[in-house]
Image: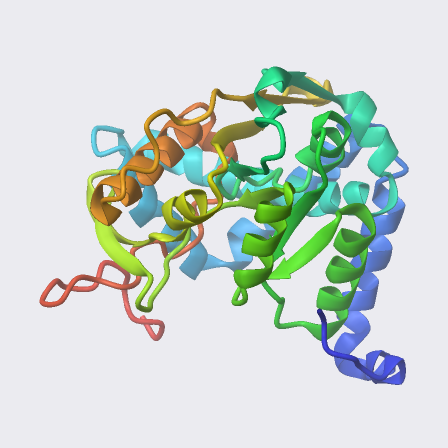
Amino acid sequence: MIKAVNPLEFLAPRYWPTWFALGLMRLVIFLPLPGIEFCGMLMGKLLYIVLPARRRIAEINLRIAFPEASDREITRLIKSCFKNMGIGGFEQALNWWQSDRLLKLCEIEGAEHLIPPEGKGIILLSAHFTCLEIPGPTLIQHLPVPFQVMYKHAHNKLFDSFMYYHRARLYEAVVDYHKPIAMIRGLKKGNAAWYAPDQDFRGKDMIFVPFFGVPASTLTAPARLAKMTGVPVVPYYIKRKPKGEGYKLVILPPLKNFPTGNDEEDALRINQTLEELILHNPEQYLWLHKRYKNRPEGEPAIYPPRHK
């Protein structure tokens, strides 16, 4: 649950840019989808210019994932990533204020894989695509069980309040990222849970296994959740169709022979599955995250220091 805040706090000048951004998002989503995407691409181009450090992170990640790619292709992918990230910002507003509209825009393939064994829940495994918010209403419509999502609080309290409120309105439950016990309880009750473990983690519940061929700090939690609750793990990915024609949500069959009980094998299987999802649509994946920030003992840093 989000911490209680005094609404008057959000009138402070430091929140005025956030209010402006939220107002802009609210207005833009009244446009047809091609218009929304055009505005998003303009925003993405601006972000590409003003976020050189993130450009560098994306370049490093892409060179790891595509070592044979030319400089020209890497640059193209970076620019596509930023454009799609800009679009994703306005799509988030669609999910907040016009979620019914998304049902008409999102085509689904493999919906039969969303039906878990009787009395069981289901773990929906995906990655941080730039159209992350799009599948929610469609998944809710096709899932025969309640749907809960993980939530990581934003640093900006105003934006965090908006995001939490709208997710809580849409989903059965919003589970704190740092309190997975609530997810376990939900899965045991027969709920569906969304999980995207493709980011860098530290702590006792992680191990280093390859992600695109380079050791990455990886959670063991997906396999342990599946083992503790006995639920299937079902991967999916989402992609934008060209020319503002909508979206395609692809649900893949449940992972077979998973988990094995071996943390390293299971974590590697998760990373390989995430790689497969990402390679279906690399232009729309969020490459700006420091996926390799934590390194195995004795290995050099992959990303440059902040001051450089």
On the image, the x and y values in percent for residue 219 come to 35, 54
Q: In this view, does 287 lie to the left or right of 162?
A: left
Residue 89 falls left or right of residue 53: right
Residue 194: give x, y in percent of width and height.
Answer: 58, 43
**Which residue sits at x=33%, y=38%?**
259
Q: Nearer the viewer, residue 113 or 56?
A: 113
Q: Which of 218 and 182 is in front in this view?
A: 182
Considering only vertical position in the picture, is 255 above or below 201? Answer: above
Vertical comparison of 13 with 222: above or below: below
Q: Can residue 63 be seen in this view?
A: no
The image shows residue 85 at horizontal and vertical percentages of 59, 44
Question: Where is 151 relative to 131, above or below?
Answer: below
| Residue sitting at x 70%, y 35% | 145
Residue lying at 30% horizontally and 35% vertically, measured from the top left: 269
State the image coordinates of residue 184 (x, y, percent, origin top left).
54, 54
Q: Nearer the viewer, residue 1 or 137?
A: 1
Pick the quarter of the image with the N terminus. bottom right
Quadrant (top left, top right, bottom left, bottom right) of the C terminus: bottom left
| Location of residue 20 by image quarter | bottom right
Q: Which residue lies furthest to the left in this view?
A: 298
